[in-house]
Image (cartoon, rainbow, N blue to C red):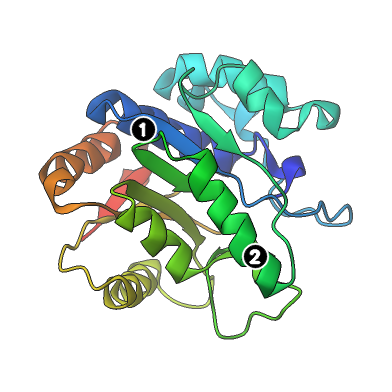
Amino acid sequence: MQEHYLGDVHDFVKYAFLRSLTEQLGLRLGVNWYHTRTEPDSSDGDNRAYLSSCSEWESWEPDLFKRIEGLQQLSERRFGRVRELGILPTSTIYYEDQVPIPMRDRREWHESARNALRDSRMVFLDPDNGFEVKSMTALTRPKYTLFQEAIDFLRDDKVVITIQFAPRSEPVDSYARKRRSELREVSETKYCLPVIRGRAASPNILFFVLAPANRIPLLKGALGNFSKGSPPYKDGHRVETIE
């Protein structure tokens, strides 16, 4: 996650999702930013027209809309401002150390994150791109969540949420199900929670959720409630569940 992305339209959906789940489940949230260096020449993640284009976003989450405006000036886009602005619940724990490139240091970084977020019961992993892919290199690896990192948090008895940006080259639903199957296989879990699709901008943002068995029934209801509570959009809602 690069700090200059903070406050874009995808972030609005992220924060709305996390606020909804913490309210419904009553679990303390931990955020692992997957902090990577800012790429100053990149215009990705800078979709901010939603703040002025219509009232849809403000009417969906008026309190969030008001708070996230504090991230729109480039000079204000730093992780600490999310806490200062009260965008997420005040009890939220954050880990923002930069993701290292060498794998030997990556493991230490991950263990530090687990320790920093040990008092949370739900963790959000926020990489630049999503889950690991075969094409990643030593230099691009910091932009991805490794499957084992998500599994470790699950084994710590936490609800685990992470993101994936959907490619434009294939149907979103089939891609989401394929990635979920990979995640289920490597995590050896038999539970299949819906994937949450945020139809905020191109590319769409996907949320994958892993959870201990005793959390599954409540989570299914919470995911459905979040989707149904989102604004209408085209033939459905801004947020959809992919079963």
> Residue at horizontal 64%, vertical 38%?
8
* Picture quadrant of residue 179: bottom left
Of all residues, the one furthest to the right in this rendering is 41
Where residue 206 sits, quadrant-wise, is bottom left
At label 1, which amino acid type do we have?
Answer: Pro
The residue lying toward the viewer, choosing from 62 and 149, is 149
- Characterize the local packing of mark 2: few (<14), some (14-19) or many (20 or more) Cα atoms within 10 angstroms: some
In the image: residue 179, left or right of residue 100: left
Regarding mark 2 in the picture, which secondary structure is present there? Answer: helix
- Give the labeled residue for mark 1: 231
Gap in angstroms between the C-alphas marked 2 and 1: 39 Å
Determine the residue positioned at 47% across, 15% down. Answer: 62
Going from N to C along the chain, the mark reached first, 2 or 1, is 2
List the single residue furthest toward the bottom: 134
User: Mark 1: which secondary structure?
Assistant: loop
The residue that appears at 21% across and 68% down in the rendered structure is: 189
Q: Is residue 18 placed above or below 175 in the rendered structure?
A: above
Residue under label 2: 106
Quarter holding residue 53: top right
Could you tell me how many numbered marks the image carries?
Answer: 2
Residue 47 screen position, x and y as percent: 67, 43
